[in-house]
Amino acid sequence: MNSSALERYSLGLDIGITSVGWAVLDLTRGKIADLGVRLFDRAEEPKTGASLAAPRREARSTRRRLRRKRQRMSDIRSLIVSHGILSQTDMDNLFNSPHPCTPWELRAEGLDRLLTCEEWSRVLIHMAKHRGFKSNRTVAESDIKNSEDGRALSGIKENSELLKAGNNGAGYRTVGELIQNDPKFSGHKRNKGGEYSHTILRKDIEREIDALFEEQRKFGSTYASMEFENEYKDIFGRQLPFAFDGAIEKLIGHCSLEPSEKRAPKASWTAERFIFLSKIANLRVRSDGKKVPLSIDERRTIDNLAYKNTKVTYKQIRKALNWQDNLVFDSLPFTKKDKDPEDSVFVELKGWHAFRKCLSEKLGKDYWETISVNPRLLDDLAYALTFKKTDEDITRYLEERNIDKKIIDAVLPLNFSGVVNLSAAAMGKLIPFMEKDGCRYDEACVKAGYLHYKPAEKERSLKLPVPDWEEIRNPVVIRAIAETRKVVNAVVRKYGPPESVQVELARDLSRSKEERDKIIKEQEENRSQKEKLAKEFQDKFHYSPNGRQLEKFRLWKEQNGFCLYTGQYLAPGDVFNGSDDSFAEIDHIIPYSISFDDGRINKVLVTSGANREKGNRLPYDYFGGDGEKWDEFTARVNANIQNRKKAARLKIKSLDDSDISEMKERNLSDTRYITKYVAKWLEENLLFAEKKAENNVTRINGRATATLRWQWGINALKDREGSDLHHALDACVVAAATPGIIKRISDYSRDRELQKLKVNAEDNKKRRCPEPWEHFRKEVEARLSENPAEKIREFGLAGYSESELNELKPIFVSRRPDRGATGAAHKDTIYSAKYLNDNPPRIVVKKSADISEKKRP
């Protein structure tokens, strides 16, 4: 391999959850300079998706909890001794001999008789050990089922009602009396097997403490004074809050437009208003295929709808605006085929409607109407309920802002989480432009004096710095980026600064385990549907289809067998005769040279003649403005195309520059936040060979690279199951997707659509777009082989000197080393020293019994 610096090279990065494929393309000589794969373990538990730090964190939390409990119990025992109830010796021997009554019996009897010093001590210690459940927050009964502590709260509610109404309607005086005497607790007194049915509210136990002390004083006990009771209750009630005041705010990142400001809560009025206005500004609607903007009245109608309905769907918008079928939404969320895309939610103001429901029910609708027009008040409420985690902290924060006590009490059951990327201050400056002028986010930024698109000027170097992890909390993403940094730094050390970097991130990167499992399930369903389609094809035409034939068959079925452009029925025998498939061809509705959209929604099956005549035009332009032919065409579309998005695309009458720009951005670039973050990090910190006016870093989405693999004939080389080398293969494609090569592909596609290129050659039939350089596919195949030098000689590839071939080695797959001997030293098993003094000493291991049928003799 060439170890010297390269004059011009492109670096491709294929970043996944457990791998980074990389490739260096020498743009001067037109060859692959280097490529490789970096592998690492996923930074999570493989089966559950839980954080690797979770076991340590849970163990540390358990140790801390046990340490606090030991200290509390030690203080209770010391308190009993200090008040002379028991001597230190008696305290040490208190539990060495059994007592005829259980602590539960003593707690019930303590209401009706004087307890001895030993019995009173047992009761006090027992209650301090089992204090019941206490939440840091007020929780509404309606939220019990949806709460994280739902099962515990459900058990608490049931036991609280039993405490009041049990014992044949007379109720029980205390928790001790309830648990001792009620049939529900006859089997066992505490929770078992992960259940929460026996959970008790701490307030009920605190009431029992008051009752026991009062009754013992009445019986003449000298060890139940008010002074002793207060000291006992102080120790009994010690509990640290979920988070100290201000702890959550410290974890919140800063605004990207106002760096000195913290990000705003997602549930705040300002954040929800900003997001809603952004969605309205980005909403695209087409009338008879032509893009039309929303009128002021239409915006106002949608605005009113959002604050009236808890959820606003696209269908509700259509109904409210009385839109006919000729007016369609330009972009709808992806849904399963059996679900109408217009049933998808357009906007949901969760915070605002939560406040509306809560305050209207507790304080009245009229009172809510006066509050709802006060954004500052709603922002303060959302801030407190997002960042403050105890009732005391919430109350203190809101009282400092002079908010009415009855409002505070009403909203305490609410709980919010999450922040947006901007601060309330920045959004407050943008919202007026978005409300008045209907500006998009970028337009509002310009008017407000922000340069949201301009990266901060930083000192670049040949070594990437550690990223600011404040922006990313996902450990899987953090590890992937950390390994990417190692790869890039190693490549730059060897070859010098790159001319450009192309990045592709796996679509499941930064997703949760549940979301990744859902993607896998969808992929399996798609694979199953494809297999069923292939079987149907084989049963119908008696031969196995290739990928192109299968795609034609799917489109043929979707169109009910008709050519949409001519209306001619495409007889299956003519289309799928097994030897000549030139009778019907796949056409891109919006030409590929314009849209770079190779998805099925942009494809139709038409006669070869119609495909040639249409060229690189829209269907409307193909009919040349002939109203009668256009009406016949739209009628065929309505009759044969069930997919609304495809039907709307077929009816588009014109495309402006913004449409074309959006299509290219959508179909070539990855617009996810995490990809933008990685691209920005590279762009701002890495030193490039030549700083361009445009970005040196290009974000490539997976659909684009999949299309390029197919068009360059590289798909056949990809073997996901056989080895990890397919990551390097993808990186070669990503590295080749430079802006210059993309333009060549666009020009080539346009010429093909205009029939300026001959397509008689077998090679041109297989690949529609030119390779980055001649024999690129063969070079990729050679570099992926076990003996690349031999393959290069076999293929007769130019560009490699004999000395280079002698040094050429197979791809090296590097792996992240595991340097630490970490992990549990032993199993989390309970061991008893019951027989430790035996000879030989023995221990008892606690294990669950297996009484299944197959184990019985």
Image (cartoon, rainbow, N blue to C red):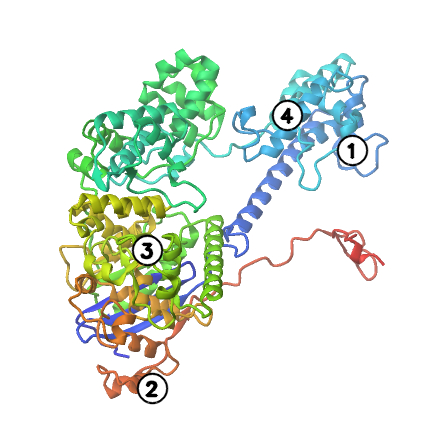
Which residue is labeled 2 in the image? 790
The alpha-carbon separation of the residues under discs 1 and 3 comes to 82 Å
Secondary element under disc 2, as helix, strand or loop, is helix
Which residue is labeled 1 in the image? 90
Taking the image as shown, residue 679 lies to the left or right of residue 578, namely left
Picture layout, residue 719 above or below residue 215 = below
Taking the image as shown, residue 483 lies to the left or right of residue 292, namely right
Q: Earlier in the sequence, mark 1 or mark 4?
A: 1
Q: Residue at x 37, y 23 (%)?
A: 308
Q: Earlier in the sequence, mark 3 or mark 4?
A: 4
Which residue is labeled 4 in the image? 157
Residues at badges 2 and 1 in contact (C-beta under 8 Å)? no
Q: Which residue type carries mark 1?
A: Asp
Q: Nearer the viewer, mark 2 or mark 1?
A: 2
The alpha-carbon separation of the residues under discs 1 and 4 comes to 39 Å
Q: Which residue type carries mark 3?
A: Gly
Q: Please tell me which residue lies in front, 591 or 389.
A: 591
Rendering coords of residue 492 (x, y %): 25, 67
Q: Which residue type carries mark 2?
A: Glu
Q: Residue at x 83, y 61 (%)?
A: 839
